[in-house]
Amino acid sequence: MKSFTELSEREVLALAVANEDEDSRIYRSFADGLRGSYPDTAAMYDKMAEEEIAHHDMLLDLYRRKFGDFLPLIRRQDVKGFIQRRPIWLNRPLGLEAVRQFAEQMEYETARFYRRAAQSAHDTAVRDLLNRLAAAEDKHERLAQELGEKIAPTARAAEEETARRIFVLQYVQPGLAGLMDGSVSTLAPLFAAAFATHNTWSTFLVGLAAAIGAGISMGFAEALSDDGSLTGRGAPLMRGAITGIMTALGGLGHALPYLIPHFYVATALAFIVVAVELAAISWIRTRYMDTPFLQAAFQVVVGGVLVFAAGILIGSS
């Protein structure tokens, strides 16, 4: 890799040409990835790609006038300290807010590159063009904001609602399913062991095994349920991991108090943890599933109490 300060004016211009070409293709990729769910935002990135193509043509015209038709191959990864960008445009589906933040950062970094290149340029024409492009990138950043503001409020609201539905479908639902299963299904074996043995360490081991076993089972079940291609539920590996982890955490919550050696203190604390878990599940259902809180609480508490009572009765018999 070469240091930026070691680049000649010819190499700086070639690098700028390659940079503008890559940026335009990134914006086209954003537009392509967002068009199905966010058509107005996709149109905005199409316009930004056209701006980058215009910058590319200006740089290429200057290069050809000064250095001829041969354009050396030099890319950002060939230069130390040059702009390095995480390729989020390769992921599907694209996150709306992540793309917006990435685009703003792109414009800011590109403007800084042009200003730094202009400072080291000896040729007046090259320096003037780089300074103009730096100013254009500043305007381009503002253009992105203005184009975003021009999106009709109804279209923006629709896009935000689509983003919310995708988030709920791909993250909240599998996480909530895991949390509910881990918090409720592990109550019976945990409290059965507790009231059968009155041994906190043995009870903790039963709770730990139940939580991990339920997490593995739920994770595989969710991952194998569908591939997400038709339902839009996202990558099966991600869904399975979210469900499995939340199931294990839900089960571990009321098992951890049994690390306390005093049985009744540990059991009282476990009761409190169970109440907090059920309240958290009810709140999540109200917040993301549009279920009235009292209705959600009633449904969750009834199920939890039945499982909880079954464990105590079995353990005390």
Image (cartoon, rainbow, N blue to C red):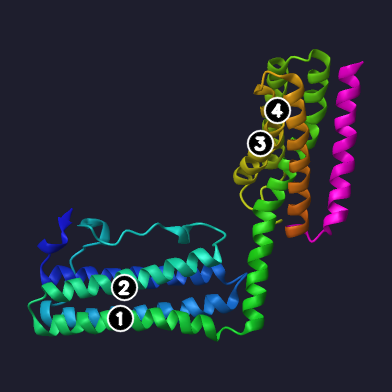
x%, y% of residue 229?
66, 54
In primary-sequence order, the first of circles 3 and 4 is 3
Q: Is residue 281 above or below residue 13?
A: above
Q: Which SS type dominates the magenta stretch?
A: helix
Q: Give the extent of the magenta segment.
A: 288-317
- Which residue is under mark 1? 55
What SS does tag 1 mark? helix
Binning the other alpha carbons within 10 Å of mark 3 as few (below 14), some (14 to 19) or many (20 upward) gives many
Q: CA distance from mark 2 to mark 1?
A: 7 Å
- For the point 89% across and 20% down, the residue is 314
Question: Disc 2 versus disc 3: distance between alpha carbons?
Answer: 47 Å
Q: Name the amino acid, label 1.
A: His
Q: Mark on residue 249? A: 3
Residue drawn at (78%, 43%), measured in percent from left and top? 278
Residue 180 image-quadrant placement: top right
Where does residue 3 sit, x and y in percent of width and height? 15, 58
Q: Amino acid at mark 4?
A: Ala
- Disc 2: which residue: 20
- Where does label 4 land, which residue? 255
Q: Is residue 295 magenta?
A: yes
Q: Earlier in the sequence, mark 3 or mark 1?
A: 1
